[in-house]
């Protein structure tokens, strides 16, 4: 037993100092790294292989599926949420477009109504204006006729007055009254 | 000063009788500090993964987010490197990654680092190499050897390049094992040496007189220990990650042999 373990320091070895001393001497006397003490290799390699296989089985059968499930679930949740958000957004956009169309329609209606009212009012005003103008025009025409008549009468009187005045002037100058025929001739000569 | 190599010494904690197996010869079944470190890492990993997954919520808590981070890291790695079949090899790569990461990190808290044992890193490398061989032959049969036949090279050069490819393929487990081993060994030796400086220079300083000059150097060493510890945490993660990446790349070589060549 002891001979196979010359290279380790055996802690709490009851096998006396002699053994411990040789062990230490062998350890440091070799000068190499402890990693190259090949008698320790088999135990470590075998144990590591066992641990590796156990961990591999645990990872592939338990841990990885569990985490994948959660991650897939998360991906689903996120994609669902994104899809819902997209849908809601599309709906909102649709509604916004509808509202906009409604507003545009209302605006057009209002504009049409305003235009109609304006037209109505304008027409009304125009017709009233036309009627009033007609009345005024009639009155003007009437007045003009009256004025024309007065003027004609006045013009007719002017001739009589002129011949009277001429007769009077002739009578004053010549001492005898001019005949109406002479007056007419004179009038024509002027 | 304490021997910086002593920390790698395998020590028996519980001695069990040797057994003699037919092929391997005499095998020492003793429970050593290495076994305890591996068991601790294993228990921590299983406990962590169980805690992460036992009550997994759609909206993750902190612990679950951390677990899912590691899970997603390796999952993305396997998916992006191996492709569609990556999921099939995910448990293997994840197991590899978690064990190495656990042992690396625990090595910074315990007095013994399992991954600084060549036996351990060789085992990890051989498991990976063995899986690559098994998958390679199972999927491609003898077409597996197309891996070494460079179709892109000129015909005359193909045997030469193929030979180089073959040798480099055989060296893969060696580089895998030595990279991890070397990183862990070097980091822990450096830590131990600088920590040893702190103590021995501190004792020198306590002597008084000109020895007082040792105090600033001891303080500098302490700063180095702190900085190196931070670096070692990074290395612990990085080496586990590198191992996982290389395992994926090597698996991809044989899984997608027809597509790549």
Image (cartoon, coloured by chain):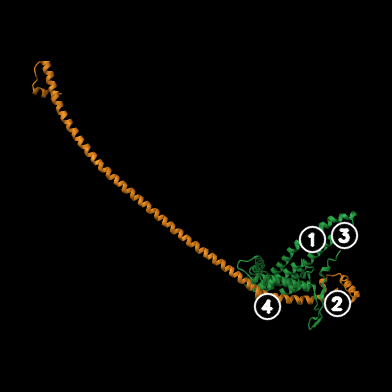
Write down which chain is painted green. B
Q: Position of residue B146 (x, y in %)?
A: 67, 74
Q: Quadrant of residue B228?
A: bottom right
* Disc 2 to disc 3, C-alpha distance: 36 Å
Q: Residues within 10 Å of mark 2 (few under 14, many from 20)?
A: few
* Parent chain of label 1: B
* Disc 4 to disc 1, C-alpha distance: 48 Å
Judging depth in this view, the residue of B48 and A47 nearest the camera is: B48
Q: Which residue is mark 2?
A: A5
Q: Horizontally, is A63 left or right of A170 in the view?
A: right
Is A163 above or below relative to B174?
A: above
* Disc 2 to disc 1, C-alpha distance: 35 Å
**Would you say residue B261 is visible in this rendering?**
no
Q: Which residue is mark 4?
A: B137
**Would you say residue A66 is visible in this rendering?**
yes
Q: Which residue is mark 1?
A: B225
Q: Are marks 2 and 1 on the same chain?
A: no
């Amino acid at each position: 037993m002891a001979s196979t373990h010359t290279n380790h320091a055996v802690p709490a070895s009851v096998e006396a100092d002699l053994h411990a001393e040789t062990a230490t001497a062998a350890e440091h006397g070799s000068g190499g790294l402890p990693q190259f003490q090949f008698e320790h290799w088999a135990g470590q390699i075998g144990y590591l292989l066992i641990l590796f296989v156990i961990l591999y089985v645990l990872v592939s059968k338990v841990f990885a599926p569990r985490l994948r499930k959660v991650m897939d679930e998360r991906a689903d949740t996120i994609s669902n949420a994104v899809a819902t958000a997209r849908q809601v957004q599309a709906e909102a956009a649709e509604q916004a477009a509808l509202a906009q169309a409604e507003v545009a329609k209302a605006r057009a209606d209002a504009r049409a109504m305003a235009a109609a009212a304006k037209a109505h009012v304008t027409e009304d005003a125009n017709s009233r204006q036309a009627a009033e103008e007609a009345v005024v025009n009639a009155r003007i025409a009437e007045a003009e006729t009256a004025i024309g008549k007065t003027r004609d009468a006045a013009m007719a009187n002017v001739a009589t007055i002129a011949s009277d005045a001429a007769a009077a002037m002739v009578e004053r100058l010549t001492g005898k009254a001019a005949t109406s025929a002479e007056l007419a001739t004179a009038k024509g000569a002027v | 000063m304490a021997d910086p190599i002593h920390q790698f010494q395998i020590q028996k904690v519980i001695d069990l009788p040797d057994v003699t197996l037919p092929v391997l010869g005499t095998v020492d079944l003793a429970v050593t500090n290495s076994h305890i470190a591996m068991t601790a890492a294993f228990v921590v990993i299983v406990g962590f993964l169980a805690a992460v997954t036992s009550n997994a919520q759609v909206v993750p808590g902190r612990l679950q987010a951390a677990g899912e981070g590691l899970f997603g890291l390796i999952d993305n790695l396997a998916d992006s490197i191996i492709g569609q079949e990556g999921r099939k090899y995910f448990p293997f790569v994840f197991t590899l990654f978690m064990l190495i990461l656990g042992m690396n990190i625990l090595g910074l808290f315990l007095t013994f680092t399992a991954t600084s044992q060549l036996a351990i890193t060789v085992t990890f490398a051989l498991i990976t190499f063995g899986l690559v061989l098994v998958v390679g032959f199972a999927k491609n049969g003898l077409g597996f050897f197309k891996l070494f036949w460079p179709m892109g090279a000129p015909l005359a050069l193909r045997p030469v390049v193929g030979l180089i490819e073959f040798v480099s393929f055989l060296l893969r487990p060696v580089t895998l094992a030595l990279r991890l081993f070397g990183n862990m060994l070097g980091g822990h030796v450096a830590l131990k040496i600088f920590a040893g400086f702190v103590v021995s220079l501190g004792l020198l300083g306590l002597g008084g007189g000109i020895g007082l000059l040792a105090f600033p150097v001891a303080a500098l060493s302490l700063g180095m220990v702190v900085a190196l510890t931070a670096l070692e945490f990074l290395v612990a993660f990085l080496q586990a990650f590198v191992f996982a990446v290389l395992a994926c790349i090597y698996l991809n070589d044989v899984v997608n042999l027809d597509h790549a060549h």
